[in-house]
Image: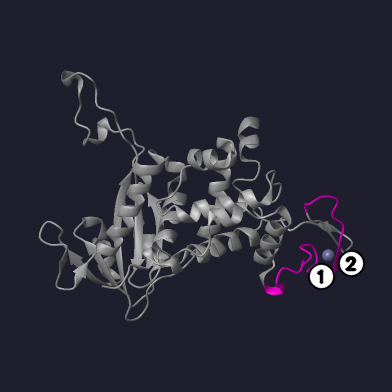
Amino acid sequence: MSQHFLLSAAARSISLRSVLRMEEKEAWAVFCRIRWENTDGQPVCPHCGSLTSYDVSRSTHPRYRCKDCRKDFSPTSGTLFAYHKQPINVYLAAVVLFVNAVKGISALQLGRDLDLSYKSAFVLCHKLREAMATETRGFVVGGEGAAVEIDGCHVGGYVKPANHKENRRDRRKAVNQNGKRRVVVAIRERDGRTVTSVFRSEDEATGFIANRVARGTAVHADEARSWDALHARFTMHRINHSEAYSLDGACTNMAESFFSRLRRAEWGQHHHISGAYLARYAGEMAWREDHRRRSNGELFRLVAGRAAKLAQSVDFTGYWQRKAAA
Ligand SMILES: [Zn+2]
């Protein structure tokens, strides 16, 4: 029997050990090669795009001055890592820990591993999720001859049962729920990408599915009535899960596998995912699912590469400061 990819040495192409062992200069060189991939680490002015600059560093933190526009910049200027406060290899280590955690990693755990405050770890994790999300932003799956699976998974809105039996209410009734329950809808192309979004109910997802699935795609879904509206647009294959999980070519098992990973992240790592952030966690899990057969070094380069090129975070730069001011 052939060995599972994740057990092979090829799946381990980067390690926390190697990153933490780096001297600061070496870690900056790694960061520069990730940020300025096309010039093999040679600085490119973020203000005017010039390739000619000179070193004006006054510490181990590199600083450059552009010969054309005379402005100063650092390798992190204008990226998700701008205004960073920790040595650069702590961020590289955070990315390694983050990509190695196949079911996600909680901010508390990352903070304990790297001695970061909960707030710093929380913001860092969300910035990495933001970088992951750019890969499938506006992405349309499927096409002529392709097949996608659609399904929904309810998250949140837990209502604790009362202590005494006589005080307990039927939590299945809407009146006894707290309105915080959301559904993550996933569209997963077979041998392709997974795109997700969050709604109050599956019925609201029709427009999203129509926008993100190309015409001519065969769509597989379960028997839930919410998907009936899709028959007008796509060739549908419905599977009744009370009869079988795969029947006459209809099957949503790949969408279910994705939800299995999301559930494990929710229950095993985060314990509770608030509605406001649910879409980000769903996107992260979709990214992990789609890239599950890549080596961790490749995953590191994908995430760090996007984070190092992505403009400053709109949502998370100064996140806690803004909260305090509000
Ligand atoms: Zn310049």
Would you say the beta carbon of the disc 1 residue lies within 8 angstroms of ligand 1?
yes
Name the residue nearer the viewer: 66 or 28: 28
> With 251 as the anchor, is 267 left or right in this view?
right
Residue visible at 26% across and 30% down in the picture:
176
Q: Which mark is residue 79?
A: none
Would you say the beta carbon of the disc 2 residue lies within 8 angstroms of ligand 1?
yes
Name the residue nearer the viewer: 7 or 159: 7
Q: Which quadrant is home to the N terminus?
A: bottom left
Provide the residue span drawn in magenta. 38-61
Q: Which quadrant is home to the C terminus?
A: top right
Q: Name the residue carrying label 2.
A: 67
Name the residue nearer the viewer: 111 or 286: 111
Coordinates of residue 178 in the picture (x, y in percent): 33, 33
Question: For ligand 1, which image quadrant applies?
Answer: bottom right
Residue visible at 44% across and 70% down in the picture:
140
Total labels: the figure holds 2
Marks 2/1: CA distance?
Answer: 8 Å
Residue visible at 77% across and 56% down in the picture:
74
Q: Residues within 10 Å of mark 2 (few under 14, many from 20)?
A: some
Coordinates of residue 127 in the picture (x, y in percent): 57, 50
In magenta stretch: residue 48? yes
Residue visible at 36% across and 38% down in the picture:
180
Q: Name the residue carrying label 1.
A: 50
- Above or below, 162 relative to 278: above
Q: Amino acid at mark 1?
A: Ser
